Image: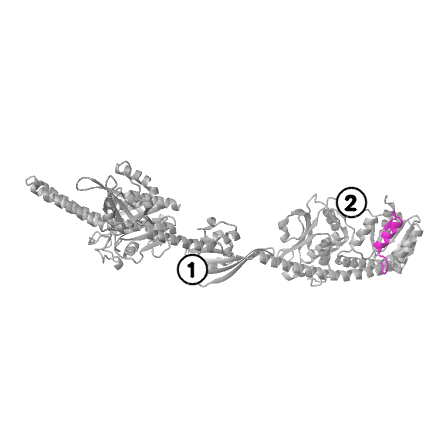
Amino acid sequence: MSLCWHEGVNKIYDRLFSTTDLEGRLKIICDGVVSVFGADFCRIWMIKQGDRCGDNCPHATSNDPRHLCRYRDRCLHLVASSGRYTHLDGFHGRVPYDCYKIGRIASGKEATFLTNEVTSDPRVHNHQWAARLGLVAFAGYQLRDNNGRVNGVLAFFADHRITAEQHAIVENLANSTAQVIQVSLHQEELEEKVRQRTAELLVTNSELRREIARKKQVQQALVASEHRFRSLVRDLPNIAVQGFDRSKTVVFWNRASEKLFGFRPEESLGRKIDSLILFDSRRPLFRKDLEAWIRQERTMPSGETVLRDKKGFPVPVYASYVALTNSQGEKEFYSIHIDLTEIKKAREASRKSELRYRELFDHMKSGVAVLRAVEEGQDFVFLDFNRAAEQIEGISREQILGRRMSRMFPETVSSGLLEIVRQVWKDGEPRYHPVVVSRNDTILSWRENSVYKLPSGEVVVLYDDLTREKRMESEKEAMARKLRRSRKMEAIGLMAGGVAHDLNNILSGIVSYPELLLRQIPENSSLQRPLEVINESGLRAAAIVADLLTVARGAASRKEPASLNSLITRYLQSAEHSQCMKANPGVVFATRLRPEIPPIRCSPVHIRKILMNLAYNGAEAIDGPGRVEIATDTGRLDQSSQTRNPLPAGEYAILTVRDTGPGMSAQDVERIFEPFYTTKTGGRSGTGLGLTIVWNAVQDHGGHIDVATGPDGTQFTIYFPVTDELPEKPRSTVDLDLLTGNGETILIVDDEPTQREIACHMLEHLGYRPVAVACGEEAVAHIRNHRVDLVLLDMIMEPGLSGRETYERIIEIRKDQRAIIATGFATSSEVEKVFEAGAAMLVKKPYTLEQLGQAIREELGRAD
């Protein structure tokens, strides 16, 4: 674009010498500014010394004292206009010196005037007119000749912004315009004198008809006039003029040429113009162009070029060419050169300064945005944007320059950063302002902004992107919380596991003996109801122990493929759910189950505990009428989900339980999964273990649970890994009479005497022949010497062999030995190893006759 502007200016200079008329040249400059720089309109005023305004001056009768023509002999006259307005009369046809923008530019109060905000700049007096025409920018330049005298003003309006480079180019053009006016004024003076002499010659010619002698006098006058012209051109400052004839021989060399090129007149006259000031490499093309111009085949091109001085050093100039006819009627050719050395130096210094600034600006590690206020500081537009800012925001500098801050980054409004920028712009005080954007407790971005105001009025925002560091800190803190929770749960789990093991052995007698006694006494016995109560109490106690085992993560549980929808349906038909509905009559339970959901590998008992606890929790959170919805769905987690969800990528079955209660506080959400922590008040039931059971069960299933809460309710969302295995058909209840044996031998291995005694009584009642031993070593010895049909094996026995080690030794003796694991507490890893070795069934202590009988019947009936 810069090259196009310079080429356009060169064409303006080319056209300047197509006419000798000053107003014609100034019209060419106005036309050029409009066409090259896209100005809406451009005008040139000249100060005409001694010209007094008449009554027709629109300012002469103004009541505003500022507009009285106090300097009528220095009034600015509009002499050239182009673009939207081409007329030279009207209100601005004459402008008082020192009034309005034009007069103030002429007086030097604002010798160079530039604004890109004409609709809001207080120096522009008619904002409504500018807005109506859609004008954006205005520039004005004082036209000062080489003697320091002001001879006019060049100004233009544009409907677009004027860049710094455009401003510099037009300012150079204005300087050249001042020189053109200066030369033209000198030339007009000379031409006026020539016209006067010509008029005299006309009179003289009429007299010469009568008196031939007077012809000599007229000739002498013409020679004198030409001499004066040459004298004036010779003394022109800073404009080097060389005259040469058709053979390119120098015939005129003014003082400015001597100063510019170092050749004295006596050194240059009589020599070829191209041999004096052209480098050897450029002479052939120059000679070709010059000869074609002399032959009047084409114009001599004007523009910036580089010539050489006497010492061979380069001299940057602006060159133009003029052809004149002398008093003898012969053609004389003139080259006019304006020295551009200082301008080039200034340009180079400006370029180097800009490069240094740009290097520093673009290599900063912090993002930097330079802003300019618009709409009186209500918003700001981007003037510059460094590379670090491009990388931080993911946007290029070209996409953002000139755009509004509030539109490009709407979050600066909501975060308060835009208001901080306004305050800094108003009072100039630097401010620091961090901006954090987060969603679902995940930091999306973290910017730390320092805002400053430059002396020029622009606002600079210096900022760093700390998103990664802050996100890592947040994740580290979350991991620390999870670790603390895991350690707390592990400690409680170890305690719960030990307690559960001992309680289950104690409960075996409370659960099993009443069941045996009930089968031996008459139905109308007075002992029947007490025994039933004892049995029911034992079963309830066993259920509590089962909850403790769930808290003790890693407790043994048999996992199998199952349909999540089927497990939900079975729970909703259970006695537990009926009891929940009775306890909360105002709560409606609803389901939204996605059909054909993939199966999950799970412990159905634990999934039922999850459903029961979440349903109870949701119902009891509602005070009065409300709704609890249980829903299922499927979803795929990708790598991007791991910032919030630690599960590996893959497909998951999703269980959602949502209530319409009042929600929970952030403190409650943080602690709801801790054992014995409860938010239930006002007589609501609850031990504080319910959600702990849910959390542990989800972890044991390789899943994840999220909690979302608000004034409209709370939602628990659980992710379970899906499996390709097909669910097994539900087992039907079998009549106890069909579970009796045929005298098969069953070896009981348990370190608890009471448990061995209970197991023997139950097996005898079921029709089996029990044999009991107290440790693993005795079991191995017995198997070595006797055959048994089945081993009923306890997993935890101290001291001596564990249940796993006992079974591994047994199958070394008898590879096909069938076994059932009976345990009050054992880790899943230990149980899985026994299953891998060949055992297939697991019964939890305390077990009932039905559970024991069905497990033995299935194991004995299992095909090898």
Furthest residue toward left: 210
The image position of residue 276, as x and y in percent, is 29, 45
Residue 798 on the magenta span = yes
Residue to which mark 1 is pinned: 454
Image quadrant occupied by the N terminus: top left
Q: Secondary structure at mark 1?
A: loop
Q: Nearer the viewer, mark 2 or mark 1?
A: 1
Residue to which mark 2 is pinned: 728
Label 2 neighbour load within 10 Å: few <14, some 14-19, many 20+: few
Number of on-image labels: 2
Image position of 217 with respect to 146: above or below: above
* Residue 139, visible in the rendered structure: no
Say whether residue 528 is left or right of residue 574.
right
Task: Please tell me which of labels 2 and 1 falls first in the chain.
Answer: 1
The image position of residue 683, as x and y in percent, is 71, 63
Q: Which residues are magenta?
A: 797-819
Q: CA distance from mark 2 to mark 1?
A: 76 Å
Q: Secondary structure at mark 2?
A: loop
Foreground residue, 26 or 415? 26
Q: Kindly indicate the quadrant of the structure image that contains residue 864.
A: top right
